[in-house]
Image: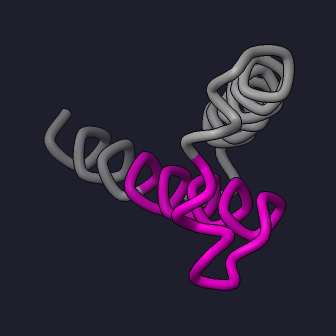
């Protein structure tokens, strides 16, 4: 069931949301709050990538759980 078109739409939507978040943070002064991650040696690209992957994994698990209930 992982190859359901709804899952692809979910992943693409989350990718656009992460790109929008990156745009908002780079366009405002909120980038100063990411200094903590830079001090730990985590680049901005890694941070957004990890957030995207974790969010997609949880969303797919929740989606599959809801499909099994229905």
Tell me: residue 36, above or below residue 16: below
Q: Is residue 63 left or right of residue 49?
A: left
Tell me: residue 6, above or below residue 3: above
Question: Which residue reaches farthest left?
Answer: 69
Residue drawn at x 46%, y 52% as measured from the top left: 60
Dominant SS of magenta comes to helix
Residue 27, image x, y percentages: 85, 16
Colour theme: one colour
Residue drawn at x 77%, y 59% as measured from the top left: 44
Near-viewer residue (29 or 65): 29
Residue 51, image x, y percentages: 57, 56
Near-viewer residue (67 or 55): 55
Name the quadrant containing residue 63: top left
Picture quarter with the C terminus: top left
Near-viewer residue (4 or 58): 58
Magenta segment: 34-60
Name the quadrant containing residue 7: top right
Residue drawn at x 61%, y 50% as measured from the top left: 34
Picture quarter with the N terminus: bottom right
Name the quadrant containing residue 49: bottom right
């Amino acid at each position: 069931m992982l190859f359901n078109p709804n899952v692809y739409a979910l992943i693409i939507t989350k990718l656009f949301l992460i790109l929008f978040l990156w745009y908002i943070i780079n366009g405002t002064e909120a980038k100063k709050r990411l200094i903590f991650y830079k001090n730990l040696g985590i680049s901005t690209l890694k941070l957004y990538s990890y957030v995207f992957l974790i969010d997609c994994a949880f969303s797919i698990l929740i989606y599959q759980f809801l499909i099994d209930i229905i």
